[in-house]
Image (tube, rainbow, N blue to C red):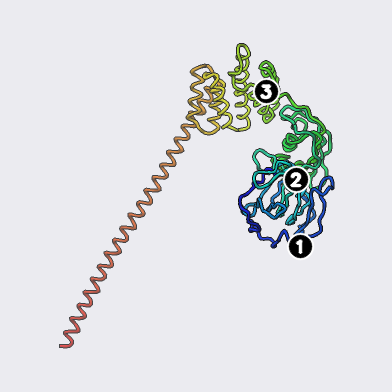
C-alpha cells in the first residue's frame, strides 16, 4: 500500500464524494471469508454492503475507492474520506500492499467490505512510519466505486486501454528494435476478425499488418503475459474501418487479446561503444530511406529518430568517429525534416532543420527545407529569406529560384488581400459615418419643423384669444 499516505487525521466516517449507508466497523457484518492466496487466514473479508453487477476488477484495471484503515485496537491511521478525495491505483502493479491487490479483485461496483490483513500481506516486520508498528495486522473498510482499464497511451487519450489476463514473467518489456513473437486475436463486437501468430520488430509493427494499438500494448508487456486491449479508431483502422474484416466506418472500438510468447530485446544505446552506435545509425538510416522511398513516412520518421537517439550529443565522439557521427546526425535531422514535410508537419520540420543548421549553418538542404516549411505555414517572408540564403550559396539552384518566385507571388497576393480588406473596411466606416450624418441632419430638421409647428399653433391660439376677447366686448 505504498501509495496510500498515512494521514494525521483520526476521524472516521466523514462523507466523501457521494453518500453511502452509515456503517460501523463494530456493527453487524456478514460471514467472514478467507480470501488469502494460500487460504491460511492472512486475509479475511466481510461484506458490509453488497455490490452491483457481476464483474470484478482485474490486474491492469485502475480502481477508484474510499477507505479507512485501523489497527486492531480501533486506532484509525489513515482515511481517504478525511481528505474528501477518492484514492485510485492500478491493480496488480504493486502500487499498494499485497493484501489490497488481492482484496479489490473480489469486489463489485458499489460494494463496501471490511478486510483484515495480516502483516505478511501488509507492512511486515518494518511497519510504516510512526502510525503502523512492526508486525501490525491492519483492518480496512473499502468502498469500491468503479474501475477502468489502464490507459497506456503517451497522450493519455484512452485510445489504448489494457487489462492483464495472465501475468508475465520478470520485469523486462520489449524496447525499440526488439524482436517479438505474439499470438493475436482481434475482435469486433465479440466476433473474431483476426487470429494469427506474428513475429515483428518493435517500431515496425505495421510492416506485419499490425495496428499501432497492438504495438503500444506489446511494449508494456512481459514475457508470457496475456492481455486484453481495447483500441480506439485512431490507434486501429481509422475512421473508415476495414470493410473486408467486417469493421464498418465510424466504429467505436476493437478489442485484441495478445499473448507475448517471447521477445529478444535490442541492444540499448548505453550498452554499445561509440563504434557500435555509429554502425547501428548507418543501418537505421538505410532502413529509414527505404521506408521513405516506399512513402511509408511514419516508419521512416521512427528510423530517422533512432539515428538521433543512437548518436546523442556529438561531443561524445572523437577523431574519425566524430566526423562520421556529425555526418549521420546531419543526415538524420535533414531526413526527418523532409519526412515531416511529407506529412504536413511543418513545425517539426522547422525544428529539425534548425538542428541541422546548428551543425552546418550554411547547409543548403537545411535552409531550403526550412523555407518549404515556412511556406507551408504561410510565413512567406521567412520562406523568402531562406530561399534567398540558398541562392546566395548557389545562384544556380533552380528549385530555390522557383520557390522564391512562389514566395514573392504569395507575399504580393497577401498584400493585395490586405489592401482590399482595409479598403472595404474604410468604405464600410465611411458609409456608417454618412448614415450617422444623415440621421443627425434629419433629426435637426425634425426639431426645426417641430419648432415651426409650435410657433404656428401659438400664433393661432393668440388669434383665437383676440377673437374671443373681441366677441366678449
Q: Which residue is mark 3?
A: 270
Gap between marks 2 and 3 measured at Cα: 41 Å
| Mark 3 crowdedness (10 Å alpha carbons): few <14, some 14-19, many ≥20 | few
Asked if residue 252 shows in the view, the reply is no
**Residue 252 at x, y percent in the picture:** 72, 47
| Mark 2 crowdedness (10 Å alpha carbons): few <14, some 14-19, many ≥20 | many
* Quarter of the image that includes the C terminus: bottom left
**Residue 286 at x, y percent in the picture:** 69, 20
Which mark is drawn over residue 28?
1
Of the numbered discs 2 and 3, the one sitting upstream in the chain is: 2
**Residue 328 at x, y percent in the picture:** 63, 19
| Mark 1 crowdedness (10 Å alpha carbons): few <14, some 14-19, many ≥20 | few
In contact (CB < 8 Å): disc 2 and disc 1: no
Of the numbered discs 1 and 3, the one sitting upstream in the chain is: 1
- Disc 1 versus disc 3: nearer the observer: 1
Asked if residue 265 shows in the view, the reply is yes
Asked if residue 328 lies left or right of residue 471, the reply is right
Residue 396 vertical placement versus 268 (above, below) = above
Mark 1 residue element: loop
Gap between marks 1 and 3 measured at Cα: 60 Å
Answer with the quarter of the image where residue 114 lies.
Answer: bottom right
- The residue nearer to you, when weighing 158 against 409, is 158
Mark 3 residue element: helix
- The residue nearer to you, when weighing 46 against 275, is 46
**Residue 62 at x, y percent in the picture:** 71, 46
Q: Which residue is mark 2?
A: 119
Which mark is drawn over residue 133?
none
Amino acid at each position: 500500500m505504498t501509495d496510500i499516505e498515512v494521514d494525521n487525521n483520526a476521524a472516521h466516517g466523514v462523507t466523501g464524494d457521494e453518500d453511502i449507508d452509515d456503517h460501523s466497523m463494530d456493527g453487524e457484518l456478514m460471514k467472514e471469508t478467507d480470501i488469502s492466496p494460500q487460504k491460511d487466514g492472512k486475509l479475511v473479508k466481510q461484506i458490509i454492503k453488497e455490490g452491483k453487477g457481476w464483474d470484478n476488477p482485474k490486474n491492469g484495471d485502475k480502481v477508484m475507492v474510499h477507505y479507512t484503515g485501523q489497527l486492531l485496537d480501533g486506532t484509525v491511521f489513515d482515511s481517504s474520506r478525511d481528505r474528501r478525495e477518492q484514492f485510485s491505483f492500478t491493480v496488480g502493479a504493486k502500487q499498494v500492499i499485497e493484501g489490497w491487490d488481492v482484496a479489490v479483485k473480489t469486489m463489485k461496483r458499489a460494494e463496501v467490505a471490511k478486510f483484515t490483513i495480516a502483516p505478511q500481506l501488509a507492512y511486515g516486520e518494518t511497519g510504516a512510519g510512526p502510525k503502523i508498528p512492526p508486525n501490525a495486522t491492519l483492518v480496512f473498510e473499502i468502498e469500491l466505486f468503479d474501475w477502468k482499464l489502464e490507459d497506456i497511451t503517451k497522450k493519455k487519450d484512452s485510445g489504448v486501454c489494457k487489462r492483464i489476463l495472465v501475468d508475465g514473467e520478470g520485469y523486462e518489456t520489449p524496447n525499440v528494435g526488439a524482436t517479438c513473437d505474439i499470438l493475436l486475436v482481434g475482435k469486433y463486437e465479440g466476433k473474431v476478425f483476426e487470429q494469427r501468430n506474428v513475429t515483428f520488430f518493435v517500431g515496425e509493427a505495421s510492416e506485419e499488418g499490425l495496428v499501432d494499438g497492438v504495438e503500444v500494448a506489446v511494449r508494456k508487456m512481459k514475457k508470457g503475459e496475456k492481455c486484453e486491449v481495447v483500441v480506439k479508431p485512431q490507434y486501429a483502422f481509422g475512421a473508415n474501418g476495414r470493410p473486408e474484416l467486417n469493421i464498418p466506418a465510424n466504429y467505436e472500438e476493437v478489442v485484441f487479446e495478445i499473448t507475448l510468447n517471447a521477445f529478444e530485446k535490442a541492444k540499448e544505446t548505453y550498452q554499445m561503444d561509440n563504434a557500435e552506435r555509429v554502425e547501428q545509425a548507418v543501418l537505421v538510416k538505410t532502413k529509414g530511406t527505404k521506408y521513405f522511398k516506399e512513402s511509408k513516412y511514419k516508419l521512416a520518421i521512427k528510423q530517422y529518430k533512432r539515428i538521433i537517439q543512437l548518436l546523442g550529443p556529438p561531443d561524445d565522439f572523437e577523431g574519425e568517429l566524430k566526423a562520421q557521427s556529425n555526418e549521420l546526425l546531419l543526415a538524420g535531422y535533414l531526413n526527418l525534416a523532409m519526412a515531416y514535410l511529407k506529412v504536413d508537419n511543418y513545425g517539426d520540420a522547422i525544428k529539425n532543420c534548425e538542428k541541422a543548421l546548428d551543425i552546418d549553418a550554411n547547409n543548403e538542404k537545411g535552409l531550403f527545407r526550412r523555407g518549404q516549411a515556412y511556406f507551408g505555414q504561410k510565413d512567406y517572408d521567412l520562406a523568402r529569406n531562406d530561399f534567398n540564403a540558398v541562392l546566395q550559396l548557389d545562384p544556380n539552384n533552380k528549385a530555390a529560384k522557383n520557390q522564391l518566385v512562389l514566395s514573392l507571388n504569395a507575399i504580393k497576393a497577401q498584400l493585395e488581400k490586405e489592401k482590399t480588406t482595409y479598403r472595404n473596411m474604410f468604405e464600410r466606416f465611411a458609409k456608417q459615418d454618412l448614415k450617422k450624418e444623415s440621421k443627425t441632419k434629419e433629426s435637426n430638421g425634425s426639431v426645426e419643423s417641430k419648432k415651426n409647428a409650435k410657433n404656428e399653433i401659438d400664433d393661432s391660439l393668440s388669434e383665437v384669444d383676440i377673437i374671443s376677447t373681441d366677441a366678449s366686448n
